[in-house]
Image: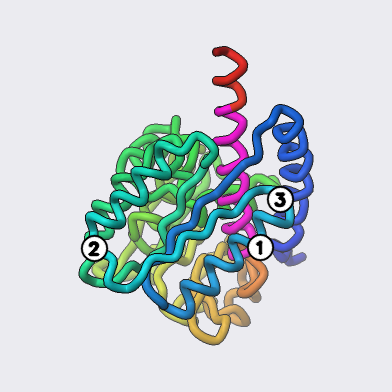
Amino acid sequence: MEKLILDGHLVSKEIREDLQKRVSVLKEKGITPSLATILVGDNPSSETYVKMKGNACEKIGMNSIRIHLPEETTTEQLLTTIKQLNEDTTVHGILLQHPVPAHIDERKAFETIAIEKDVDGVTSAGYGRTALGFGKYPSCTPAAIMEIIHHYELPVAGKHAVVVGRSPILGKPVSALLLNEDATVTTCHSRTTNLEAMLQQADIVVAAVGKPNFIKGDWLKEGAVVLDAGYNKGNIGDIDYDSCYKKASAITPVPGGVGPVTITMLLKQTVISAEETALKNQIA
């Protein structure tokens, strides 16, 4: 059986080339797509992620607004910053880098982000719209998974998809997106009994459990499509790649699979937000 390696770098490159053109068109109209990233505290990993996102913006001609707040920032102070960005008409997307310090009410902060600027898909309203099928900005990793599926024209309708993980920004929304495209979806989690039997029925497997090398090849149905959204220490995914590769018809590597497309979806959704602004200006 021929194996299809689902190359996230290739998918990302094609999307970014398109986004560069769209950014140029917007700039001709006097609008530069702008993403504001908020980092609270000095978590080194978070600092790296924010820097990567900023650099990605700049490479396609977008503005990156980086806001770094001290560790002792209160919830109310953070909410004030978010509200200011909500009201700033030159800002098209807002990203609050997770995690925030433990004393901050992260959910309250997420919910303060205006729905039209929630390009990272973290608000409950954004999740609800995604689940109902009319959301513009799903969480970026689920959006990346669907983008890879579409790029490689992998069939979804009528297939049995098993999602391992139920987090509010990955497992739950990707289950909804697959369901909206007519897959039959089973969402599994830490309390699922007989997970192996579930996976042996799956045409599509989405690994989003946060445990390195967790899913083994002998758990899979022959010819399954495997999308690994895990990213663990040492650049290791949630699937045991070598054993899963033997059974899969298509598989994402880690690194180089879902990850590169995730950041690109953040850019894409910010550009879409800027295009919405341009449309409103035109109508006005």
Q: Is residue 180 left or right of residue 72?
A: right
Q: Is residue 178 left or right of residue 33?
A: left
* Label 3 or label 2, whichever comes before in sequence order: 2
Viewer-side residue, 106 vs 32: 32
Q: CA distance from mark 3 to mark 2?
A: 45 Å
Quarter of the image that includes the C terminus: top right
Give the structural element (helix, strand or loop) at label 1: helix
Relative image position of residue 69 (x, y in whole percent)? 38, 65
- Main SS of the magenta part reads helix
Identify the magenta region: 259-277
Front label number (2 vs 1): 2
Can the viewer see residue 46?
Answer: yes
Residue that label 1 marks: 55
Residue that label 2 marks: 74
Amino acid bearing label 2:
Thr
Relative image position of residue 183 (x, y in whole percent)? 48, 43
**Residue 152: assigned label:** 3
